[in-house]
Image (cartoon, grey):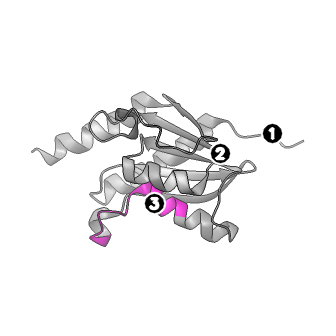
Amino acid sequence: MLVPFSDEYFMKQAYHEAEKAFEKGEIPVGAVVVCNQQIIARAHNLTECLNDVTAHAEIQVLTAAFNFLGAKYLNTCTLYVTLEPCVMCAGALYWSQIQKVIFACRDEKRGAGRFKQELYHPKTLVQNGLMEKECRSILKNFFELKRI
């Protein structure tokens, strides 16, 4: 009998992506897309490496998931991401019609939750707080090192 993976397992995979971003000097945000208990895409921020301000982890992972499925909608998928999506990423998630978004920590400065208007698709379930401490810590460490 196949035992399903937990939300924490998938968030840990997103966290591993954030660690890869950290090692590259990117803001450490990682993401995975899961469909039927299988990771179909994984990514991390690449804005510095690609010289592209839109190369957020969410955009990268959505593109990989669309390519994997050969479809433009992710209405049976879940996104796990270490930081709350920004408005740009929330817009992309809206258009993808993703079933669920689970993020670790809020982004008080740029997160989509700062806005009263609902930015996600009406059918998208949004949850937060999973592995918040760990994901906030890697971000804090990254920015502390940048200030040295």
The earlier-in-sequence mark between 1 and 2 is 1
Q: Which mark is residue 3?
A: 1
Q: Which mark is residue 59?
A: 3
What is the x, y in percent for residue 22?
32, 52
Left or right of 2? Residue 30 is left
Q: Is residue 17 visible?
A: no
Q: Quadrant of residue 62?
A: bottom right
Q: Is residue 14 magenta?
A: no
Give the residue type at disc 1: Val
Q: Which mark is residue 99?
A: 2
Left or right of 118? Residue 125 is right
What is the x, y in percent for residue 48?
27, 64
Q: Residue at point 26% right, 57% down?
A: 25
Left or right of 25? Residue 38 is right
- Dot 1 and dot 3 residues touching (CB under 8 Å): no
Say if 36 sits above or below 8 in the image.
below
Instruction: Magenta stretch: give its range.
Output: 50-62
How crowded is the residue under tag 2: few (<14 C-alpha within 10 Å), some, or many (20+)? many
SS category of the residue bearing label 1: loop
